[in-house]
Image: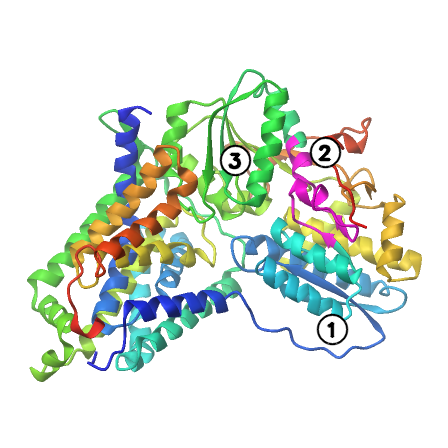
Amino acid sequence: MSNNNQFTRRSLLKTAGGIALVSGISAPAILRAQTADVIKIGHLTPRTGFLGPLGEYAVMAADLAVEEINAAGGVMGRKVELLKEDSVNPQTASTKAERMIERDKVACIIGEISSASCLTIAQVASRTKTLFINTGGNSDALRGKDCQRYMFHVESQNSMYVKTVGRSFLRDGLVKGKKWYSLTADYAFGHDLLRVSKRFMEANGGNFAGDDLVPTDATDFSAYLLKIREAKPDLVVINLAGNQITNFLKQYAEFGLTFPVGGFGFDTALAWAAGKGNFVGTWPVVWHHLLETPGSKAFVAAFTNKYKKPPENQAWGDYVAVKIVAKTINDLKSAESPKIIEHFEKGAKFDVLKTREGYFRASDHQLMHEMYAVTALPADKIKNQWDIFASSPAVPAANEDLEIIAATKEENSCTFPS
Amino acid sequence: MSTMLLAQQVLNGLLDGVYYLLIALGLSLIFSLGGIVNLAHGAFYAIGAYLTLVLSPYLGFGGSFVVAPVVVALMGVVIERTLFRRFYRSDPILSLLMTFGLAMVAEQALRMIFGAPPLSYSIPTWLRGQVAIGSFIYSFYRVVLLGIAITCIAALWLLLQKTSFGRVVRAGVQNPDMVGALGISLQPYMSAVAALGIGLAGLAGVLLAPIYSIHPAMGQEIITPAFVVVVIGGLGSFWGVVAAALLVGLVKGVMVGIGYSAASTAAIYLLMLLVLLFRPRGLFGERITRFE
């Protein structure tokens, strides 16, 4: 409130731009002394931004896995220490991966949700010959044209999501001769998913009534809902991610639309956030907390006991990845990445808390495992805020090859750079 | 696309703009009077939404609607008294950094208290359903929301135009030193303006909690379009901000309506660029000597 304000619009813009730049770089990790009696594992995942809510589950699960491993005697008689960082964005993820590997000497890096950050971490991993296990990046490209020898995928690829939930859509007669209206997140993940889901729709005789790209910062879907109501589709297909799925579901219920809803990408935390009555449709998941296998029940019990809420599917990925690495190091009596990779490529089987064991497919390093389609329960059948869906049996079924839901060589081929 | 659908998109776009308005008006007021670029404004919107979640089991949605904005407004007074007031006489760049930090602290505090995962909250049953306006079927909740927003905006305008309080605030925007020379201290007025502006952001949080995802970073989602609205509208102009908000909502809605949804966000920045090229002070911006 004085005359000595030196303020102009130009300086405002400059400062705002500067702040935007600086905000991409977060505080450096606290240095820890390197000691010989621990094995360090790096954990990198987005903890802020639109994927942050899922990253939080990833961190909780990785912590739980390490706690259990150390309580059972650690690996090769040494304690496991988890170095955890917010990966923020692809550039920061790559810088932090490099620091973890070169300065902190981690045995491997586990984590990530953003496909774009997976790519930059994988480049660092390849250069430094260090194992990276992707627990949340879905894009087929990471298992195809961008595949890397040092990157393995516990998270399923988009093709697996599409073929899993696609079975439910085929069973319910929502594909052949039917009109779909799709909303797709306008970035790498969405584009990849749209390509794979379109291939599935066309191969099975469906077509688009409408097909909109949604900017990643959109929060209001009313304009899209008016278009959907006008188009009267047989199925509304959601290829969105993060909070946008929750926003969409809440507003879909608000506008009273009743067309069947389905999606090709999904996380249970988003259904919980949409809540009873708002959550509708059929969606694919890598895992969910209602699985009746002994491994899953033990994991859900331990997680719920520690954090007072059940784990969501992202928690499964990071928990299983840490356990797989620990078991492998113990079995091989070595924490060297090339040896671990050789072991994985030979088709070693692992308990992934499901009916069947999983293994990494040597051709693209994708974990082969069972998936599920979940369908929202009607409001009067819901007993609590967590158990709001019913699950399909495991996909593929017990008598089928685990690889039939994965992308074929023709659909997505990987040649590891030498 | 039918004319009917286009008409629906135009109406819906205008309604969408009204949500930005609740945020943008406070932003504009605090900036015009104090020279504070309040980057933490979105955080108060988020706090409003979380308060609705906390208070609803005890007070219901109706009770939260009354109490939450008041609580947020009181937080605004505290922030104004302890932080904003130190920056009125310094370079606004400093206050911009301060409010940026404040936004991060608030977001992280929400994350520590409520956790990072989004939380669920639904429209109360008595506000659900659809209304038909002619052949245009629309969400009843959004019609109510529009009514509340228009009432607030009209009340704010009357307060600024027709009361002695409003006269001092408007004079303070134009020439604070002259107001001081007339023996009027702007200090209590600044507190009141902060309470009003920040309270409005809290109110927006309450109103949007039932239809948007509630998560710690939700403030970031709304602050950028709100800033665009303030810049397009022009400083010191009440109706400029109103027109800009409607225009932004309209452009976004129509872009989606005519099938260019991917460019709907880019379009509002393009709009801002064009407005700044041809009218550097914004649509209806007044010439305010100290900001030139």
SS type, badge 2? loop
Query: What residue is drawn where x is 65% and y is 61%?
Result: A94
Q: Is residue A109 above or below residue A273?
A: below
Disc 3/disc 1 C-alpha distance (Å) = 42 Å
Q: Amino acid at mark 3?
A: Ile
Residue A388: percent from left, percent from top? 57, 39
Question: Same chain for marks 3 and 1?
Answer: yes
| Residue in front for this viewpoint, B60 or A319 | A319
The residue wearing badge 2 is: A407
Dots 3 and 2: beta carbons under 8 Å? Answer: no
Q: Position of residue A329 (x, y in %)?
A: 87, 59
To which chain does the residue with label 3 belong?
A: A
Residue that mark 1 sits on: A103
The secondary structure type at the circle numbered 3 is: strand
Position of residue B227 measured from the top left corner of the image (x, y, whole percent): 32, 59
B218 or A390, which is in the foreground? B218
**Which callout, 3 or 1, points at the residue further toward the start of the chain?**
1
Q: Which mark is residue A238?
A: 3
Which x, y percent locates residue B59?
A: 35, 54
Q: Is residue B210 visible?
A: no
